[in-house]
Image (tube, helix red, strand yellow):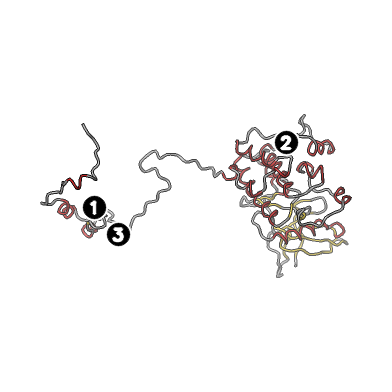
Amino acid sequence: MSWVRGNFIGRGSFSTVHLAVPTANSFSEIAAPTAVKSSEVLFCSFLKNEKEVLDCLGFCPHIIQCSGDGFSFENGGEYYNLFLEYAAGGNLAEHIKKQGGRLPEADVRRYTISILKGIQHIHAKGFVHCDIKLQNILLFDNGDVKIADFGLAKRTMEREEKQSREEKQSEWRGTPLFMSPESVRDNVYDSPADIWSLGCAVVEMVTGKPAWNSPNGSELSNIYSLLLRIGVGEELPEIPKELSEDGKDFLRKCLVKDPAKRWTAEMLLEHPFIKHDGEEKSSPRTHFDFPDWVSSTSSLTPTSPESDQWREWKFDTSSRVTCFCSPVDQLRQVVTKERPNWSESESESWVVVRQE
């Protein structure tokens, strides 16, 4: 691949993100615009893990796509580079700040649906993201959001090789404010952990504040006390009062201390909060107030009574469909010298509309 490092986009714990610009007059595999996530080779294990996970996940419209990787030598150092889709809208946390600190419920629902579908795909492929948070949800120009940053992702417990007790105790994955109780307490990182993190992200979308906000309103500075609140006891993040009842119930299905009782991504996709389409059905106010009814006019239908087409249409008694004809012809077919048959045999089908 032939490219040069462009404008700076952002920085993570072990990597930086820039625009990757294809060089002029080169046949590059890099599509413009593309982001390049880079790390020194000595610290590139997370980036390499992200590449492996994204390759295993394959295509999903709700997950950031990878277009390749490679090495480069810059300023006397060797770097590992990962090429990813460029999200011009930044991350969801930045977007919320620009919107005044919180989002309307319709937007929360729309973003949650995309994130949830991405999580469903991740879990179906046998992986756990382990770091679902608003900073890792990227926003595109068309309004779509996609899950990004798979550096901490891992296979589910069912598929991974058994680790020793010492290895599990030393494992630390995720951002404390979004970590699940079982992750904090038992170093367990399975599919339900992502659902807990999703619940925390939804709370932050609604309120503009972390789900584990400090009781006195100050910033959380003591990580140890935070982890105690998450992993020990029965305390749960507060459900935002401004949410609808469906929204509140959705969060109650995510923020469950016991991971075995937490809803799965598949179950949550069927929740009323997600299935709600925002359309209200109402009775018609007039005879013509039927929005789902579409009238179609045949090209053979006369456009006006004065049209010559009136004389070309017939009265079809066999099919019980009245076609257009001239008024004179129509009267001739309606007016007849024959007396109508009022026999009793016909009266069984009569309907009494008034009786005095």
What percent of the width, then of the height, locates residue 248? 64, 37
- Disc 3 on helix, strand or loop? loop
- Along the line of sight, which residue is nearer the eye, 61 or 140? 61
- Disc 2 on helix, strand or loop? loop
Q: Which residue is mark 1?
A: 305
Q: Amino acid at mark 2?
A: Pro
Q: Amino acid at mark 3?
A: Leu
- Along the line of sight, which residue is nearer the eye, 274 or 149? 274
What percent of the width, then of the height, locates residue 208? 69, 38
Going by the image, does 165 lie left or right of 70? Answer: right
Q: Which residue is mark 3?
A: 300
- Disc 1 on helix, strand or loop? loop
Question: Which residue ends up furthest to the left in the rendered image?
Answer: 337
Tag shown at residue 143: none
| Alpha carbons under labels 2 and 1: distance apart | 71 Å
Q: How many marks?
A: 3
What percent of the width, then of the height, locates residue 69? 76, 63
